[in-house]
Protein backbone atom coordinates (compact mmCIF):
# COMPACT_ATOMS: atom_id res chain seq x y z
CA UNK A 1 0.00 0.00 0.00
CA UNK A 2 2.74 2.42 0.98
CA UNK A 3 4.75 1.45 -2.09
CA UNK A 4 1.70 2.09 -4.25
CA UNK A 5 1.20 5.54 -2.75
CA UNK A 6 4.87 6.37 -3.35
CA UNK A 7 4.58 5.17 -6.93
CA UNK A 8 1.47 7.31 -7.50
CA UNK A 9 3.21 10.31 -5.97
CA UNK A 10 6.19 9.81 -8.31
CA UNK A 11 3.96 9.62 -11.36
CA UNK A 12 1.88 12.60 -10.27
CA UNK A 13 4.83 14.97 -9.79
CA UNK A 14 6.70 15.53 -13.05
CA UNK A 15 10.11 17.21 -12.95
CA UNK A 16 9.75 20.99 -12.69
CA UNK A 17 9.88 22.73 -16.03
CA UNK A 18 12.91 25.03 -16.46
CA UNK A 19 11.98 28.63 -17.19
CA UNK A 20 14.29 31.55 -17.98
CA UNK A 21 13.25 34.95 -16.72
CA UNK A 22 14.45 37.56 -19.20
CA UNK A 23 14.12 41.23 -18.35
CA UNK A 24 14.14 43.77 -21.16
CA UNK A 25 14.92 47.45 -21.59
CA UNK A 26 17.43 47.79 -18.74
CA UNK A 27 18.23 49.65 -16.67
CA UNK A 28 14.66 51.05 -16.50
CA UNK A 29 11.99 50.56 -19.16
CA UNK A 30 9.35 53.29 -19.38
CA UNK A 31 12.07 55.82 -18.52
CA UNK A 32 9.81 58.82 -19.15
CA UNK A 33 7.70 57.76 -16.17
CA UNK A 34 10.77 57.52 -13.94
CA UNK A 35 13.19 60.41 -14.57
CA UNK A 36 14.10 60.69 -10.86
CA UNK A 37 17.42 58.90 -10.20
CA UNK A 38 16.31 57.97 -6.67
CA UNK A 39 13.18 56.29 -8.05
CA UNK A 40 15.23 54.45 -10.70
CA UNK A 41 17.55 53.18 -7.97
CA UNK A 42 14.62 52.13 -5.78
CA UNK A 43 12.97 50.16 -8.63
CA UNK A 44 16.27 48.46 -9.44
CA UNK A 45 16.83 47.43 -5.82
CA UNK A 46 13.29 46.06 -5.62
CA UNK A 47 13.61 44.09 -8.88
CA UNK A 48 16.90 42.57 -7.74
CA UNK A 49 15.47 41.74 -4.31
CA UNK A 50 12.60 39.69 -5.83
CA UNK A 51 15.02 37.92 -8.19
CA UNK A 52 17.29 37.08 -5.23
CA UNK A 53 14.39 35.94 -3.07
CA UNK A 54 13.34 33.37 -5.69
CA UNK A 55 16.93 32.49 -6.73
CA UNK A 56 16.27 33.54 -10.34
CA UNK A 57 19.31 33.49 -12.68
CA UNK A 58 17.73 36.15 -14.89
CA UNK A 59 19.07 37.64 -18.12
CA UNK A 60 18.90 41.44 -18.36
CA UNK A 61 18.77 43.01 -21.83
CA UNK A 62 20.23 46.51 -22.00
CA UNK A 63 19.03 49.40 -24.20
CA UNK A 64 21.65 52.10 -24.82
CA UNK A 65 19.33 55.11 -24.77
CA UNK A 66 18.01 53.92 -21.38
CA UNK A 67 21.36 54.51 -19.63
CA UNK A 68 22.37 58.09 -20.52
CA UNK A 69 24.06 58.91 -17.21
CA UNK A 70 26.78 57.43 -14.96
CA UNK A 71 23.99 56.88 -12.42
CA UNK A 72 22.27 54.59 -14.92
CA UNK A 73 25.51 52.71 -15.51
CA UNK A 74 25.66 52.20 -11.73
CA UNK A 75 22.24 50.52 -11.98
CA UNK A 76 23.65 48.07 -14.53
CA UNK A 77 26.51 47.43 -12.12
CA UNK A 78 23.96 46.41 -9.50
CA UNK A 79 22.60 43.73 -11.86
CA UNK A 80 26.12 42.39 -12.39
CA UNK A 81 26.89 42.47 -8.66
CA UNK A 82 23.71 40.41 -8.13
CA UNK A 83 25.35 37.77 -10.33
CA UNK A 84 23.02 38.33 -13.31
CA UNK A 85 24.05 38.39 -16.95
CA UNK A 86 23.51 41.36 -19.26
CA UNK A 87 22.88 41.21 -23.00
CA UNK A 88 22.54 43.67 -25.87
CA UNK A 89 19.09 44.99 -26.79
CA UNK A 90 20.36 47.72 -29.22
CA UNK A 91 21.04 51.40 -28.67
CA UNK A 92 17.70 53.03 -29.58
CA UNK A 93 15.32 50.03 -29.56
CA UNK A 94 14.45 50.18 -33.28
CA UNK A 95 12.00 47.94 -35.07
CA UNK A 96 13.91 45.74 -37.55
CA UNK A 97 11.01 45.75 -40.03
CA UNK A 98 10.87 49.55 -40.12
CA UNK A 99 14.59 50.21 -40.53
CA UNK A 100 17.01 49.50 -43.38
CA UNK A 101 19.25 46.54 -42.62
CA UNK A 102 22.47 48.53 -42.35
CA UNK A 103 20.88 51.20 -40.13
CA UNK A 104 19.58 48.50 -37.79
CA UNK A 105 22.98 46.82 -37.63
CA UNK A 106 24.65 50.18 -36.87
CA UNK A 107 22.25 50.75 -33.99
CA UNK A 108 22.77 47.23 -32.58
CA UNK A 109 26.54 47.51 -33.04
CA UNK A 110 26.71 50.86 -31.25
CA UNK A 111 25.35 49.31 -28.05
CA UNK A 112 27.24 46.04 -28.53
CA UNK A 113 30.54 47.92 -28.61
CA UNK A 114 29.65 49.94 -25.51
CA UNK A 115 28.30 47.01 -23.50
CA UNK A 116 31.15 44.67 -24.47
CA UNK A 117 33.62 47.25 -23.13
CA UNK A 118 31.54 47.84 -19.98
CA UNK A 119 31.42 44.09 -19.32
CA UNK A 120 35.08 43.49 -20.17
CA UNK A 121 36.10 46.09 -17.54
CA UNK A 122 34.23 43.88 -15.04
CA UNK A 123 35.67 40.58 -16.25
CA UNK A 124 32.53 39.58 -18.17
CA UNK A 125 31.73 38.76 -21.79
CA UNK A 126 28.78 39.85 -23.88
CA UNK A 127 27.01 36.79 -25.27
CA UNK A 128 23.37 37.54 -26.03
CA UNK A 129 21.30 39.83 -28.20
CA UNK A 130 17.56 40.39 -28.29
CA UNK A 131 15.59 41.99 -31.11
CA UNK A 132 13.44 44.94 -29.96
CA UNK A 133 9.75 44.05 -30.25
CA UNK A 134 11.05 40.52 -31.07
CA UNK A 135 11.03 41.70 -34.69
CA UNK A 136 13.74 39.92 -36.69
CA UNK A 137 12.91 41.53 -40.03
CA UNK A 138 10.19 41.53 -42.65
CA UNK A 139 12.10 39.91 -45.52
CA UNK A 140 14.25 36.82 -45.83
CA UNK A 141 17.16 38.96 -47.05
CA UNK A 142 17.01 41.14 -43.93
CA UNK A 143 16.65 38.15 -41.60
CA UNK A 144 19.70 36.50 -43.17
CA UNK A 145 21.76 39.71 -43.00
CA UNK A 146 20.88 40.29 -39.34
CA UNK A 147 21.69 36.68 -38.48
CA UNK A 148 25.05 37.03 -40.27
CA UNK A 149 25.78 40.21 -38.26
CA UNK A 150 25.00 38.46 -34.96
CA UNK A 151 27.19 35.48 -35.88
CA UNK A 152 30.11 37.67 -36.96
CA UNK A 153 29.91 39.74 -33.76
CA UNK A 154 29.58 36.64 -31.56
CA UNK A 155 26.12 37.52 -30.26
CA UNK A 156 23.47 34.82 -29.90
CA UNK A 157 19.85 35.73 -30.48
CA UNK A 158 17.92 35.22 -27.27
CA UNK A 159 14.36 34.39 -28.33
CA UNK A 160 11.20 34.69 -26.27
CA UNK A 161 8.75 31.81 -26.04
CA UNK A 162 6.24 33.34 -23.61
CA UNK A 163 5.49 36.64 -25.30
CA UNK A 164 3.21 38.75 -23.13
CA UNK A 165 2.23 42.35 -22.54
CA UNK A 166 3.61 42.90 -19.02
CA UNK A 167 4.82 46.41 -19.98
CA UNK A 168 1.28 47.52 -20.77
CA UNK A 169 0.40 47.62 -17.04
CA UNK A 170 3.13 50.11 -16.10
CA UNK A 171 1.28 53.36 -16.89
CA UNK A 172 -1.85 52.44 -14.92
CA UNK A 173 0.18 51.02 -12.05
CA UNK A 174 2.39 54.10 -11.64
CA UNK A 175 -0.61 56.40 -11.98
CA UNK A 176 -2.56 54.53 -9.27
CA UNK A 177 0.44 54.26 -6.96
CA UNK A 178 1.22 57.99 -7.25
CA UNK A 179 -2.39 58.81 -6.35
CA UNK A 180 -2.20 56.23 -3.58
CA UNK A 181 -5.35 54.73 -5.09
CA UNK A 182 -5.17 51.28 -3.49
CA UNK A 183 -8.32 50.08 -5.20
CA UNK A 184 -6.95 50.89 -8.66
CA UNK A 185 -3.62 49.32 -7.70
CA UNK A 186 -5.39 46.10 -6.68
CA UNK A 187 -7.21 46.05 -10.01
CA UNK A 188 -4.00 46.49 -12.02
CA UNK A 189 -2.32 43.81 -9.89
CA UNK A 190 -5.16 41.34 -10.51
CA UNK A 191 -5.12 42.02 -14.26
CA UNK A 192 -1.33 41.71 -14.41
CA UNK A 193 -1.32 38.33 -12.65
CA UNK A 194 -4.22 37.00 -14.72
CA UNK A 195 -2.68 38.15 -18.03
CA UNK A 196 0.72 36.66 -17.21
CA UNK A 197 -0.78 33.32 -16.15
CA UNK A 198 -2.89 33.09 -19.30
CA UNK A 199 0.19 33.75 -21.44
CA UNK A 200 2.27 31.12 -19.64
CA UNK A 201 -0.49 28.54 -20.01
CA UNK A 202 -1.11 29.43 -23.66
CA UNK A 203 2.51 29.17 -24.79
CA UNK A 204 3.21 26.05 -22.74
CA UNK A 205 0.22 24.36 -24.36
CA UNK A 206 1.61 25.45 -27.74
CA UNK A 207 5.11 24.06 -27.10
CA UNK A 208 3.56 20.82 -25.82
CA UNK A 209 1.69 20.57 -29.14
CA UNK A 210 4.79 21.37 -31.20
CA UNK A 211 7.26 19.08 -29.40
CA UNK A 212 5.04 16.55 -27.61
CA UNK A 213 6.73 17.16 -24.26
CA UNK A 214 7.21 19.95 -21.73
CA UNK A 215 9.89 22.27 -23.12
CA UNK A 216 11.94 24.85 -21.17
CA UNK A 217 10.46 28.31 -21.68
CA UNK A 218 11.72 31.90 -21.87
CA UNK A 219 9.38 34.52 -20.51
CA UNK A 220 9.64 38.20 -21.45
CA UNK A 221 9.40 40.73 -18.61
CA UNK A 222 10.46 44.36 -18.30
CA UNK A 223 12.50 46.37 -15.82
CA UNK A 224 9.79 48.62 -14.44
CA UNK A 225 7.88 49.55 -11.33
CA UNK A 226 4.88 47.28 -11.85
CA UNK A 227 7.32 44.36 -12.17
CA UNK A 228 8.96 45.25 -8.86
CA UNK A 229 5.53 45.11 -7.23
CA UNK A 230 4.13 42.05 -9.01
CA UNK A 231 7.01 39.63 -9.59
CA UNK A 232 6.86 38.06 -6.14
CA UNK A 233 3.28 36.85 -6.70
CA UNK A 234 4.01 35.82 -10.29
CA UNK A 235 7.19 33.92 -9.40
CA UNK A 236 5.40 32.21 -6.49
CA UNK A 237 2.66 31.10 -8.89
CA UNK A 238 5.31 29.76 -11.31
CA UNK A 239 6.91 27.76 -8.49
CA UNK A 240 3.53 26.37 -7.40
CA UNK A 241 2.68 25.35 -10.97
CA UNK A 242 5.73 23.16 -11.53
CA UNK A 243 8.40 25.56 -12.77
CA UNK A 244 12.04 25.91 -11.84
CA UNK A 245 14.01 29.09 -12.58
CA UNK A 246 16.83 28.12 -14.93
CA UNK A 247 19.84 29.74 -16.55
CA UNK A 248 20.04 30.87 -20.16
CA UNK A 249 22.58 28.12 -20.88
CA UNK A 250 20.35 25.36 -19.54
CA UNK A 251 17.25 26.55 -21.37
CA UNK A 252 18.92 27.16 -24.74
CA UNK A 253 20.62 23.72 -24.58
CA UNK A 254 17.22 22.10 -25.13
CA UNK A 255 16.99 20.78 -28.73
CA UNK A 256 13.69 22.64 -29.23
CA UNK A 257 15.77 25.81 -29.51
CA UNK A 258 17.73 24.34 -32.44
CA UNK A 259 14.58 23.90 -34.53
CA UNK A 260 15.38 25.49 -37.91
CA UNK A 261 13.02 28.33 -38.79
CA UNK A 262 13.23 31.42 -40.94
CA UNK A 263 9.91 33.09 -40.25
CA UNK A 264 9.63 36.65 -41.49
CA UNK A 265 6.88 39.10 -40.60
CA UNK A 266 6.29 42.76 -39.96
CA UNK A 267 5.89 42.19 -36.21
CA UNK A 268 7.78 40.22 -33.59
CA UNK A 269 6.35 36.99 -32.22
CA UNK A 270 7.19 34.10 -29.89
CA UNK A 271 9.68 31.49 -31.11
CA UNK A 272 6.93 28.89 -30.78
CA UNK A 273 4.63 30.92 -33.07
CA UNK A 274 7.49 31.18 -35.58
CA UNK A 275 8.01 27.42 -35.58
CA UNK A 276 4.28 26.75 -35.77
CA UNK A 277 3.84 29.16 -38.69
CA UNK A 278 6.74 27.59 -40.60
CA UNK A 279 5.33 24.08 -40.12
CA UNK A 280 1.85 25.23 -41.09
CA UNK A 281 3.19 26.96 -44.21
CA UNK A 282 5.16 23.89 -45.27
CA UNK A 283 2.00 21.80 -44.82
CA UNK A 284 -0.04 24.29 -46.86
CA UNK A 285 2.48 24.17 -49.73
CA UNK A 286 2.33 20.36 -49.71
CA UNK A 287 -1.48 20.44 -49.80
CA UNK A 288 -1.38 22.86 -52.76
CA UNK A 289 1.07 20.63 -54.65
CA UNK A 290 -1.23 17.64 -54.05
CA UNK A 291 -4.29 19.64 -55.15
CA UNK A 292 -2.60 20.47 -58.45
CA UNK A 293 -1.43 16.85 -58.87
CA UNK A 294 -5.02 15.65 -58.54
CA UNK A 295 -6.14 18.24 -61.08
CA UNK A 296 -3.45 17.22 -63.58
CA UNK A 297 -4.34 13.54 -63.08
CA UNK A 298 -7.94 14.38 -64.07
CA UNK A 299 -6.68 15.99 -67.30
CA UNK A 300 -4.55 12.97 -68.10
CA UNK A 301 -7.52 10.60 -67.89
CA UNK A 302 -9.56 12.92 -70.13
CA UNK A 303 -11.84 14.14 -67.32
CA UNK A 304 -12.24 17.83 -68.16
CA UNK A 305 -15.18 18.27 -65.76
CA UNK A 306 -13.10 17.26 -62.73
CA UNK A 307 -10.12 19.21 -64.05
CA UNK A 308 -12.26 22.34 -64.32
CA UNK A 309 -13.86 21.73 -60.93
CA UNK A 310 -10.57 22.93 -59.39
CA UNK A 311 -11.54 26.44 -60.53
CA UNK A 312 -13.68 28.70 -58.36
CA UNK A 313 -17.19 29.58 -59.56
CA UNK A 314 -15.92 33.09 -60.20
CA UNK A 315 -12.51 32.09 -61.55
CA UNK A 316 -10.87 33.96 -64.39
CA UNK A 317 -8.60 32.49 -67.02
CA UNK A 318 -6.17 34.79 -68.78
CA UNK A 319 -4.20 33.70 -71.82
CA UNK A 320 -2.38 35.57 -74.60
CA UNK A 321 -5.59 35.36 -76.67
CA UNK A 322 -8.28 36.10 -74.16
CA UNK A 323 -9.94 36.55 -70.82
CA UNK A 324 -12.58 34.10 -69.59
CA UNK A 325 -14.64 34.82 -66.52
CA UNK A 326 -16.41 32.13 -64.49
CA UNK A 327 -15.87 28.38 -64.26
CA UNK A 328 -18.43 27.62 -66.96
CA UNK A 329 -16.58 29.87 -69.42
CA UNK A 330 -13.27 28.26 -68.47
CA UNK A 331 -14.74 24.79 -69.12
CA UNK A 332 -16.17 25.98 -72.46
CA UNK A 333 -12.79 27.28 -73.51
CA UNK A 334 -11.08 23.99 -72.67
CA UNK A 335 -13.76 21.96 -74.46
CA UNK A 336 -13.33 24.02 -77.60
CA UNK A 337 -9.56 23.89 -77.54
CA UNK A 338 -9.29 20.22 -76.52
CA UNK A 339 -12.34 18.51 -78.05
CA UNK A 340 -11.23 14.92 -77.37
CA UNK A 341 -8.87 12.75 -75.36
CA UNK A 342 -6.31 12.73 -78.17
CA UNK A 343 -6.19 16.54 -78.31
CA UNK A 344 -5.61 16.68 -74.56
CA UNK A 345 -2.37 14.68 -74.69
CA UNK A 346 -0.35 14.23 -71.50
CA UNK A 347 -0.02 17.27 -69.22
CA UNK A 348 2.62 17.82 -66.56
CA UNK A 349 3.24 20.72 -64.23
CA UNK A 350 6.48 21.68 -62.51
CA UNK A 351 5.96 24.10 -59.61
CA UNK A 352 8.70 26.74 -59.49
CA UNK A 353 7.48 28.86 -56.62
CA UNK A 354 4.59 28.89 -54.18
CA UNK A 355 3.94 32.01 -52.12
CA UNK A 356 1.45 32.12 -49.31
CA UNK A 357 -0.46 35.30 -48.60
CA UNK A 358 -0.77 35.97 -44.91
CA UNK A 359 -0.54 38.93 -42.58
CA UNK A 360 -0.14 39.45 -38.88
CA UNK A 361 -3.17 39.34 -36.64
CA UNK A 362 -3.54 40.54 -33.07
CA UNK A 363 -4.94 38.79 -30.03
CA UNK A 364 -7.30 40.33 -27.51
CA UNK A 365 -4.24 41.08 -25.35
CA UNK A 366 -2.53 42.90 -28.19
CA UNK A 367 -0.03 40.14 -28.97
CA UNK A 368 0.95 39.68 -32.58
CA UNK A 369 0.36 36.24 -34.05
CA UNK A 370 0.82 34.96 -37.60
CA UNK A 371 -2.49 35.42 -39.39
CA UNK A 372 -4.43 32.81 -41.27
CA UNK A 373 -3.31 31.96 -44.79
CA UNK A 374 -5.68 33.92 -46.99
CA UNK A 375 -4.41 32.87 -50.38
CA UNK A 376 -1.51 31.53 -52.41
CA UNK A 377 0.13 32.07 -55.76
CA UNK A 378 1.90 29.37 -57.73
CA UNK A 379 4.34 29.95 -60.58
CA UNK A 380 4.83 26.81 -62.66
CA UNK A 381 6.00 25.40 -65.98
CA UNK A 382 3.53 23.28 -67.93
CA UNK A 383 4.25 20.78 -70.65
CA UNK A 384 1.81 19.04 -72.99
CA UNK A 385 2.97 15.95 -74.88
CA UNK A 386 0.83 15.12 -77.91
CA UNK A 387 0.90 12.05 -80.14
CA UNK A 388 2.72 12.72 -83.37
CA UNK A 389 3.28 16.40 -82.62
CA UNK A 390 6.10 18.34 -80.99
CA UNK A 391 5.36 18.94 -77.28
CA UNK A 392 3.93 22.31 -76.25
CA UNK A 393 5.12 24.07 -73.12
CA UNK A 394 4.76 27.35 -71.29
CA UNK A 395 4.32 28.99 -67.93
CA UNK A 396 1.43 29.66 -65.69
CA UNK A 397 0.69 31.82 -62.67
CA UNK A 398 -2.16 30.57 -60.51
CA UNK A 399 -3.82 32.52 -57.75
CA UNK A 400 -5.44 30.20 -55.21
CA UNK A 401 -8.00 30.74 -52.49
CA UNK A 402 -8.69 28.44 -49.51
CA UNK A 403 -11.84 26.36 -49.89
CA UNK A 404 -12.84 24.17 -46.96
CA UNK A 405 -9.75 22.17 -46.01
CA UNK A 406 -8.35 22.61 -49.52
CA UNK A 407 -7.95 25.15 -52.26
CA UNK A 408 -9.51 26.44 -55.47
CA UNK A 409 -8.06 28.35 -58.40
CA UNK A 410 -9.23 31.94 -58.49
CA UNK A 411 -7.12 33.21 -61.37
CA UNK A 412 -5.09 31.35 -63.95
CA UNK A 413 -2.74 33.23 -66.26
CA UNK A 414 -1.28 30.71 -68.68
CA UNK A 415 1.09 31.51 -71.49
ZN1 LIG B 1 12.61 45.90 -25.52
Image (tube, rainbow, N blue to C red):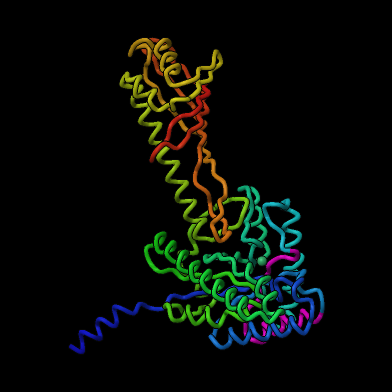
Q: Is residue 250 above or below residue 291?
A: below
| Left or right of residue 328, residue 106 in this image | right
Residue shown at the point (56%, 54%) measured from the top left: 362
Report the number of numbered marks: 0
Q: Magenta segment: does it hold 88?
A: yes
- Ligand 1 quadrant? bottom right
As drawn, the residue found furthest toward the right would be: 69
**Is 104 or 155 nearer to us in this picture?**
104
Residue 5 picture quarter: bottom left
| Left or right of residue 132, residue 295 in this image | left
In the image, residue 290 lies at what x, y percent? Answer: 38, 36
Q: Magenta segment: does it hold 78?
A: yes
In the image, residue 253 lies at what x, y percent? Answer: 49, 70
**Is 332 or 339 nearer to us in this picture?**
332
In the image, residue 153 lies at what x, y percent? Answer: 68, 64
Residue shown at the point (73%, 73%) measured from the top left: 115
| Left or right of residue 32, residue 267 in this image | left
In the image, residue 29 lies at what x, y percent? Answer: 70, 72
Q: Is residue 117 above or below residue 365?
A: below
Name the quarter where the N terminus is drawn: bottom left
Residue shown at the point (57%, 59%) measured from the top left: 367
**Is 287 or 109 nearer to us in this picture?**
287
Residue shown at the point (45%, 46%) measured from the top left: 282
Q: Which residues are magenta?
A: 70-92
As drawn, the residue found furthest toward the left would be: 1
Amino acid sequence: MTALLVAVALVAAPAPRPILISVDDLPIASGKLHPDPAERLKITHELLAVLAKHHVPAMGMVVGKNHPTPGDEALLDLWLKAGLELGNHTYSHPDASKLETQAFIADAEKERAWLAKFLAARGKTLRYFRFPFLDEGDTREKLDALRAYLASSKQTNLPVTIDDQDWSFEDDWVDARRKNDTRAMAEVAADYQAALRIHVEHFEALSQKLFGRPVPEIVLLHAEEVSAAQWNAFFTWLELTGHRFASVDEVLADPAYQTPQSYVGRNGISLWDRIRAERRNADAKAVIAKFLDVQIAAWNRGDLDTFTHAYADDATFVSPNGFNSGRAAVLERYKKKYPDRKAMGHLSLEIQETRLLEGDEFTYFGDTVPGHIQGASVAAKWKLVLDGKPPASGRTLLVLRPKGDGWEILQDASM
